[in-house]
Amino acid sequence: MSDWSLRPLLDQAKTAAAGLVGALVDAADPKAPPFLTLRLRLRSDVLVIEVDHELDGLPAPTPAPGERTGVAPSETGGVTTWCELPLPGGLSAGQVQLPRRGDRRTLVDEPVSGEPVGADPEVLERLLSRLSGWSG
């Protein structure tokens, strides 16, 4: 949020995200917890907080003043619970300065030949040896 120059929304966004995730965690079976995906995106004049999950039948969260909330089928076959927060100061999504990634080198040097980098057999052997003795 700070990198998006949306610091004024930080507390409200944290509260909304915690509420969405908390409601899903509370409704989930602790013996088979679901996989959740939290996503933030900008659209028009709002910050959209979305949580994708597979818990059916949950009601839409109660919105705080100025927020909109809902539940909709997701494109992946699950459910998306969402909340929209108005952007501060009449900003639109196009006016928000998004961070840019710098050029980063890969951690593994790629060979000049173009052949894929393979795992070192000695490292794999040591790793497998240690894992076979591990009981968790």
Image (cartoon, grey):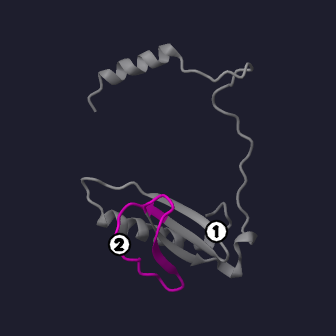
Instruction: Answer with the quarter of the image where residue 22 lies.
Output: bottom left
Q: Provide the secondary structure element on which disc 1 rests.
A: strand
Residue 33 or residue 108, whichever sits in front = 33
Span colored in magenta: 51-78
Pick out the residue farthest to the bottom. 65
Prevailing secondary structure of the magenta residues: loop
Image coordinates of residue 89 in percent, x first then y, are: 69, 81
Q: In which quarter of the image is the N terminus?
A: bottom right
Q: Examine the rendered structure and indicate whether residue 44 appears above or below residue 76.
A: below
Q: Residue at (47%, 82%) from the top-left corner?
A: 64
Residue 54 covered by magenta stretch? yes
Amino acid type, mark 2: Leu
Horizontal side of residue 27 vs 105, given as left or right? left
The residue tagged 1 is 42
Amino acid type, mark 1: Leu
Q: Residue at (63%, 31%) from the top-left corner?
A: 107
**Label 2 vs label 1: CA separation?**
25 Å
In this rendering, does residue 51 appear at all?
A: yes
Pick out the residue farthest to the top. 122
Looking at the image, is mark 2 or mark 1 earlier in the sequence?
1
Horizontal side of residue 85 vs 22, given as left or right? right
Q: Residue at (49%, 60%) from the top-left corner?
A: 38
Image coordinates of residue 35 in percent, x first then y, are: 39, 54
Q: Examine the rendered structure and indicate whether residue 89 appears above or below residue 120.
A: below
The residue tagged 2 is 58
Density class for disc 1 (Cα within 10 Å; few <14, some 14-19, many ≥20) is some
Q: Residue at (57%, 64%) from the top-left corner?
A: 40
Mark nearest the camera among 2 and 1 is 2
